[in-house]
Amino acid sequence: MEGLRCTVLLFLLVSACQSSFDAPAAKARETASATATRPSAPAVLDQLDARKPVPLLPMMANHQKQNMRDHLAVVQEVVAALGTRDFNKVTQSARRMGYSGAMEQMCKHMGSGAPGFTEQALTFHHSADRVADAAEKKDSNGVITALAETLATCTSCHATYKQKLVESLPE
């Protein structure tokens, strides 16, 4: 009887030890399985964001963001210069985000994979020219109206499009 108790006790101890070793492995398998089927946080965000993707290589996306940050700095410069009625500074700053042939080429390149993007980008740059044109006339109200139009173009574009990083551009 004592031998049977020892055997049962030994069996229970071995079983307990084995399940304590198996538990972490089972938990790891469960976690790996859940992770494999659960989408990544960027994938979830992308699914939640219904805007149209603009496919860009990482270098292009970074360049575009730098340009947009500069455009925002220009808006700040325009507002500050308008506050002191420095129309030369308003003109100079607004022209920095205005239309040029080089800007058109860049917009076409950046927007090649997103229908409508290039046209909206060029509308933005032309609206910035109207800010500069009004400043050249020393027309404060015209500067404000044109700047409001420029900012509306920004808002509309950001509401419509999002960057999508790609390994290569679509043909």
Image: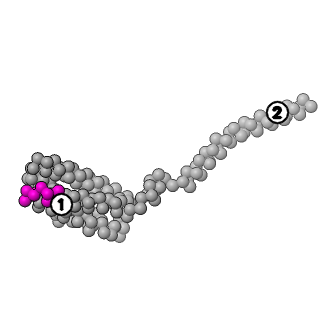
> In the depicted view, which residue is nearer to us: 47 or 27?
47
**Residue drawn at (44%, 55%) of the image:** 45
Left or right position of 87 against 32? left
- Local SS, label 2: helix
**Amino acid type of the residue that numbered disc 2 sits on in the rendered structure:** Leu
Q: Position of residue 35 (x, y in %)?
A: 55, 51
Q: Which residue is mark 1?
A: 146
Q: Position of residue 155 (x, y in %)?
A: 29, 58
Disc number placed over residue 100 in the picture, else none: none
> In the depicted view, which residue is nearer to us: 40 or 47?
47
Q: Position of residue 70 (x, y in %)?
A: 22, 52
Is 139 inside the magenta-drawn segment? yes
Q: Position of residue 18 (x, y in %)?
A: 72, 39
Q: Residue furthest top?
A: 2
Name above or below for residue 171 compared with residue 149: below
**Residue drawn at (12%, 53%) of the image:** 90
Disc number placed over residue 9 in the picture, else none: 2
Image: magenta residue range: 135-146
Q: Which quadrant of the figure has residue 15?
A: top right
> In the depicted view, which residue is nearer to us: 50 or 24?
50
Which secondary structure dominates the residues rendered in magenta? Answer: helix
